Image (cartoon, rainbow, N blue to C red):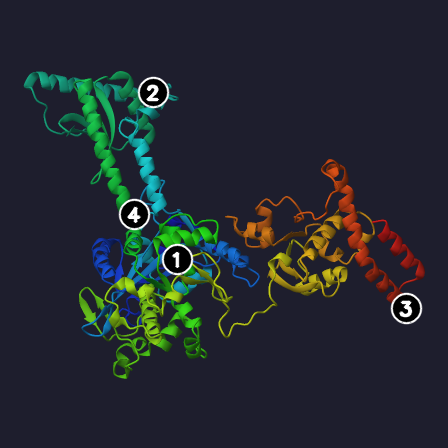
């Protein structure tokens, strides 16, 4: 099922109604509340951040885990064996850009020499992409994949806590853009205070506007005249007063008499600005930002232009400071990411390439277009990353231990850390070879507990860190020798695994974050077998838009009849509307594309009798080489079916030919010879096919299905093509 795109506000209302009882179920003991875990929301974010900063700085490594609203936006964006590494990255980029992070687990681990044990500090942050700044911040819509939402609900995810109390954020790029916008506004003296630049001297368009404008003029005249009269009579102005409708409140603004405006529409406020500008030289309209009371609209009386200019300068600086503070407040959860980046700790994840892509997309900036650019940027922010999946599957000794076990995080946790996974039930079963881990939350340390809730980001981060600590121990890493936390990333026994991540775990593609290169000799795990022979991407054609009743076997049959039984290595369905076809030779790609083009342009009988006629039936069949597939995957659009996606990407052509290999005799004959050469290629291709067709007709004749005249007519028809 295609993921649904939901606006944040709509999702908030819908899930709040549908899941109003979820808060009660998530706090039950069997769901993991007995495990000592620090849950962080907006309410306790600031003090929790202060605590976390201390724990991260003293840690040896930090484990992370994320919970998202989905993984793939369309079935054809899943990871396939025919996906090249750069295409796999584009699919990961699409996922990280479209789905939201709703929970972020952070768990620093520190080796305590005094007790010869690790101490873990698990934090579970609820995160929600709420826009705290108008026009800046997270996208106000994201996709939800039904299977992922059902998965979260099955494991008692607290949707209410996420939506109502989740911590918002700004990425670094969004913060820079907000600051640039603030500075450009600050350069305009009146834009953020008086708002007079937005007012036009246009006449009122209806009777209501005319009457309102007249009433406002009378009101401000009466108020100003009263101020002058009071000033003349007593030398001072009386205290604050409100009118009967509570729309005007007399007050002092920085020692100046003022009227605070309440209960007016945006249209009425614009009319008030126009009245003040046109009729009162000693009155000024101000839009003031206050951290406590927010935005206020006031009309202020000043005695002179110099006095007004001083007031403008003072208010402008205050507004600027208030907006800067608001931007800093809106940074929100990204402070955690900045902390991990600035401390340059070893970050540990489990099959975490998608997690790192989400971290970059949500908290750094838009994901780059190529994997090379991505890894270079990630390496600057997080120079040391370790993936427990790499450690488990690139070391023969550890592979042997995992042979008969599932590959999930929970299964690995039970396999490598049975004494920790069992909690208080296994405290007496601790083996000397097992790493000990204590948990500390709010200065309370514990060495036994009930198992936590799987797929809760904070607990998953804890499991990830425990697995990493145990794997390091199994590899012979001696934690007693690492007095400096940064030394762990440079340990000789770990160094070759650092910054190696699975771009695709299922297909064994490992990428080196230091260089952006695919790691040499990286093969799938021992139990993963390739479904197809070695893939040669330059030999691949992607075909889509063919009749829906045609299956992969029929595609192979059609093409094999035209190019020979050995022409095709494999055919693989991308979805119901598209297939990959891998040819045995690279030149067959251009031959196929040229022949297809020629047949579609021809109206002769050969186009109907040709073996490819079934594949081209309907006139909607498209074909292209592998690079075009990459272009389609890189599009920000995402249709459910690949054929619809290709059409949405504005593919106006029906066949995208690779570079024409026909050499021309000279440049001056290029335009005149182009058409003839193309026809020659098509004729040559037909010549290759003719013997097969003639043999078929002769075989039909021997079975009484074709006459000599039919064979002759077929040869004439093919020759005339």
Q: Nearer the viewer, residue 531 or 44?
A: 531
Which residue is at a point 28% across and 26% down the rendered structure image? 190
Tell which tag, 4 or 1, sits nearer the viewer: 1
User: Gap in Å between the C-alphas at discs 2 and 1?
Assistant: 59 Å
User: Gap in Å between the C-alphas at discs 4 and 1?
Assistant: 19 Å
Residue 702 position by quadrant:
bottom right
Q: Are marks 2 and 3 in contact (CB under 8 Å)?
A: no
Q: Which residue is mark 3?
A: 702
Q: Which residue is mark 2?
A: 210
Dot 3: element: helix
User: Gap in Å between the C-alphas at discs 3 and 4?
Assistant: 81 Å
Q: Which mark is residue 44?
A: none
Q: Which residue is mark 1?
A: 356
**If you read the primary sequence from the N terminus, does the residue marked by circle 2 or circle 4 appear first?**
2
Is 140 situated above or below 234?
Answer: below
**If you read the primary sequence from the N terminus, does the residue marked by circle 4 or circle 1 appear first?**
4
Q: Residue 62's x, y, as percent?
A: 30, 63
**If you read the primary sequence from the N terminus, does the residue marked by circle 2 or circle 3 appear first?**
2
Can residue 293 be seen here? The reply is yes
> Position of 272 compared to 710: left or right?
left
Which residue is at a point 66% across and 63% down the rendered structure image? 552
> Position of 290 compared to 413: left or right?
left
Q: Residue 38's x, y, as percent?
A: 25, 63
Q: Which residue is mark 4?
A: 331
User: Gap in Å between the C-alphas at discs 3 and 1?
Assistant: 66 Å
């Amino acid at each position: 099922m295609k993921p649904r795109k939901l606006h944040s506000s709509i999702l908030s209302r819908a899930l709040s109604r549908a899941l109003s009882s979820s808060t009660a179920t998530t706090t039950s003991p069997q769901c993991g509340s007995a495990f000592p875990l620090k849950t962080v929301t907006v309410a306790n974010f600031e003090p929790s951040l202060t605590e976390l900063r201390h724990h991260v700085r003293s840690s040896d490594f930090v484990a992370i885990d994320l919970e998202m609203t989905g993984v793939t936006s369309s079935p054809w964006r899943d990871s396939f064996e025919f996906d090249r590494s750069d295409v796999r990255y584009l699919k990961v980029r699409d996922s990280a850009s479209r789905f939201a992070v709703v929970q972020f687990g952070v768990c620093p681990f520190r080796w305590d020499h005094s007790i010869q044990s690790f101490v873990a500090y698990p934090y579970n942050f609820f995160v929600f992409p709420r826009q705290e700044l108008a026009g800046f911040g997270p996208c106000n819509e994201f996709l939800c994949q039904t299977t992922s939402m059902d998965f979260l609900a099955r494991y008692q995810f607290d949707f209410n806590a996420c939506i109502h109390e989740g911590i918002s954020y700004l990425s670094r790029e969004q913060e820079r853009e907000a600051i640039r916008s603030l500075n450009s506004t600050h350069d305009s003296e009146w834009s953020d205070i008086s708002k007079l630049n937005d007012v036009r001297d246009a006449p009122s368009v209806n009777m209501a506007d005319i009457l309102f404008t007249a009433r406002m003029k009378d009101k401000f005249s009466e108020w100003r005249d009263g101020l002058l009269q009071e000033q003349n009579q007593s030398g001072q102005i009386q205290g604050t007063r409100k009118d009967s409708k509570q729309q005007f409140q007399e007050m002092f603004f920085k020692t100046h008499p003022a009227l605070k405006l309440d209960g007016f529409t945006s249209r009425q406020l614009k009319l008030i600005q126009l009245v003040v500008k046109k009729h009162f030289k000693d009155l000024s309209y101000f839009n003031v930002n206050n951290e406590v009371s927010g935005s206020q609209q006031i009309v202020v009386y000043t005695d002179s232009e110099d006095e007004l200019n001083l007031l403008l300068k003072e208010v402008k600086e205050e507004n600027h400071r208030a907006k800067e503070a608001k931007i800093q407040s809106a940074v929100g959860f990204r402070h955690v990411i900045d902390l991990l980046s600035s401390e340059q700790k070893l970050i540990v994840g489990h099959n975490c390439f998608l997690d790192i892509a989400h971290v970059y997309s949500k908290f750094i900036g838009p994901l780059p277009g190529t994997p090379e650019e991505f890894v270079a940027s990630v390496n600057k922010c997080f120079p040391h990353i370790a993936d427990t999946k790499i450690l488990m599957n690139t070391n023969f000794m550890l592979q042997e231990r995992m042979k008969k076990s599932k590959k999930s995080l929970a299964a690995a946790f039970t396999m490598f850390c049975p004494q920790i996974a069992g909690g208080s039930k296994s405290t007496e079963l601790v083996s000397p070879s097992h790493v000990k881990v204590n948990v500390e939350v709010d200065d309370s340390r514990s060495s036994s507990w009930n198992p936590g809730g799987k797929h809760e980001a904070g607990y998953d981060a804890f499991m990830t860190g425990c697995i990493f600590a145990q794997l390091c121990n199994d590899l012979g890493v001696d934690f007693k020798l690492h007095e400096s936390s940064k030394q762990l990333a440079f340990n000789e026994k770990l160094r070759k695994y650092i910054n190696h991540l699975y771009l695709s775990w299922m297909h064994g593609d490992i990428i080196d974050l230091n260089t952006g290169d695919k790691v040499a000799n990286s093969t799938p795990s021992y139990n993963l077998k390739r479904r197809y022979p070695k893939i040669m991407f330059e030999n691949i054609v992607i075909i889509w838009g063919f009749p829906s009743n045609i299956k992969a076997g029929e595609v192979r049959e059609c093409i094999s009849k035209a190019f020979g039984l050995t022409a095709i290595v494999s055919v693989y369905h991308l979805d119901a509307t598209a297939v990959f076809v891998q040819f045995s030779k690279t030149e067959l790609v251009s031959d196929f594309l040229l022949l297809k083009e020629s047949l579609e342009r021809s109206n002769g009988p050969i186009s109907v009798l040709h073996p490819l006629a079934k594949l081209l039936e309907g006139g909607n069949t498209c074909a292209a080489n592998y690079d075009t597939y990459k272009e389609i995957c890189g599009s920000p659009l995402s249709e459910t079916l690949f054929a619809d996606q290709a059409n949405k990407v504005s593919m106006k052509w029906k066949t995208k030919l690779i570079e024409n290999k026909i050499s021309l005799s000279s440049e001056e004959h290029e335009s005149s010879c182009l058409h003839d050469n193309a026809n020659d290629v098509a004729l040559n291709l037909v010549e290759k096919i003719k013997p097969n067709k003639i043999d078929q007709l002769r075989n039909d004749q021997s079975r009484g299905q074709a006459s000599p005249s039919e064979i002759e007519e077929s040869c004439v028809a093919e020759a005339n093509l």
